[in-house]
Amino acid sequence: MEQPPLRPLHPDALLSEAKLEKMRARASEELLKSLLPGGLECLQARPDGMILDGHHRIKVLRERGMNVDTLPREIHEKEDMSK
Protein backbone atom coordinates (compact mmCIF):
# COMPACT_ATOMS: atom_id res chain seq x y z
CA MET A 1 0.00 0.00 0.00
CA GLU A 2 1.41 3.37 -1.03
CA GLN A 3 1.65 6.04 1.64
CA PRO A 4 0.63 9.65 1.04
CA PRO A 5 3.43 12.25 0.95
CA LEU A 6 4.42 13.71 4.30
CA ARG A 7 2.98 17.15 5.02
CA PRO A 8 4.15 19.42 7.84
CA LEU A 9 1.66 20.32 10.55
CA HIS A 10 3.58 23.56 11.18
CA PRO A 11 5.04 26.00 8.63
CA ASP A 12 8.85 25.93 8.42
CA ALA A 13 8.97 29.46 9.86
CA LEU A 14 7.70 28.10 13.20
CA LEU A 15 10.41 25.44 13.52
CA SER A 16 13.12 26.07 16.08
CA GLU A 17 16.31 27.24 14.37
CA ALA A 18 18.36 25.95 17.33
CA LYS A 19 16.81 22.49 16.98
CA LEU A 20 17.30 22.55 13.21
CA GLU A 21 21.01 23.33 13.68
CA LYS A 22 21.29 20.48 16.16
CA MET A 23 19.68 18.11 13.63
CA ARG A 24 21.88 19.41 10.81
CA ALA A 25 24.94 18.40 12.84
CA ARG A 26 23.75 14.76 12.89
CA ALA A 27 24.45 12.23 10.16
CA SER A 28 21.59 11.36 7.82
CA GLU A 29 21.77 7.70 8.87
CA GLU A 30 21.34 8.71 12.51
CA LEU A 31 18.31 10.86 11.68
CA LEU A 32 16.75 8.05 9.63
CA LYS A 33 17.29 5.54 12.44
CA SER A 34 15.68 7.90 14.98
CA LEU A 35 12.54 8.09 12.81
CA LEU A 36 11.96 4.32 12.65
CA PRO A 37 8.60 3.12 14.04
CA GLY A 38 8.75 1.78 17.57
CA GLY A 39 11.32 4.29 18.78
CA LEU A 40 10.76 6.88 21.48
CA GLU A 41 10.65 9.80 19.01
CA CYS A 42 9.72 7.95 15.82
CA LEU A 43 8.06 9.50 12.78
CA GLN A 44 4.37 9.86 13.56
CA ALA A 45 1.78 10.95 11.04
CA ARG A 46 -1.93 10.92 10.33
CA PRO A 47 -3.30 8.68 7.56
CA ASP A 48 -3.26 11.69 5.18
CA GLY A 49 0.50 12.23 5.71
CA MET A 50 0.25 15.12 8.19
CA ILE A 51 3.39 14.95 10.35
CA LEU A 52 2.75 14.84 14.10
CA ASP A 53 6.31 14.13 15.29
CA GLY A 54 9.57 14.40 13.36
CA HIS A 55 9.22 17.84 11.74
CA HIS A 56 12.80 19.01 12.28
CA ARG A 57 14.41 15.74 11.19
CA ILE A 58 12.20 15.52 8.09
CA LYS A 59 13.04 19.12 7.11
CA VAL A 60 16.78 18.45 7.43
CA LEU A 61 16.56 15.22 5.43
CA ARG A 62 14.60 17.05 2.71
CA GLU A 63 17.29 19.76 2.66
CA ARG A 64 19.77 16.96 1.98
CA GLY A 65 17.74 15.83 -1.01
CA MET A 66 16.30 12.67 0.52
CA ASN A 67 12.88 11.31 -0.44
CA VAL A 68 11.27 11.15 2.98
CA ASP A 69 7.78 10.37 1.67
CA THR A 70 8.59 6.65 1.53
CA LEU A 71 9.78 6.40 5.14
CA PRO A 72 7.91 4.03 7.44
CA ARG A 73 5.82 5.82 10.02
CA GLU A 74 3.48 5.24 12.92
CA ILE A 75 -0.04 6.19 11.91
CA HIS A 76 -2.31 7.98 14.37
CA GLU A 77 -5.95 8.69 13.63
CA LYS A 78 -7.22 12.17 14.41
CA GLU A 79 -9.00 12.14 17.75
CA ASP A 80 -12.67 12.99 17.81
CA MET A 81 -12.90 15.87 20.29
CA SER A 82 -16.72 16.04 20.14
CA LYS A 83 -17.15 13.15 22.61
Image (cartoon, rainbow, N blue to C red):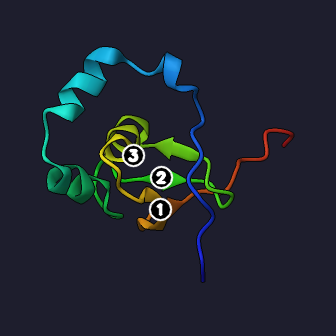
- Whether 22 is drawn above or below 58: the answer is above
Q: State the residue in front, 76 or 49.
A: 49
Mark seen at residue 46: none
The amino acid type of the residue labelled 1 equals Glu
Question: x%, y% of residue 46?
Answer: 62, 54
SS label for mark 2: strand
In the image: residue 82, left or right of residue 68: right
> Residue beneath label 3, please?
62
For the residues labelled 2 and 1, the Cα–Cα distance comes to: 5 Å
Quadrant of the rendered image containing residue 9: top right
**Horizontally, is 68 left or right of 51 in the view?**
left
Determine which of the numbered discs, if any, sits on residue 74 in the image: 1
The nearer-to-camera label among 3 and 2 is 3
The quadrant in which the C terminus is found is: top right
Tell whether label 1 touches label 2 (CB within 8 Å).
yes
Nearer the observer: mark 3 or 1; the answer is 3
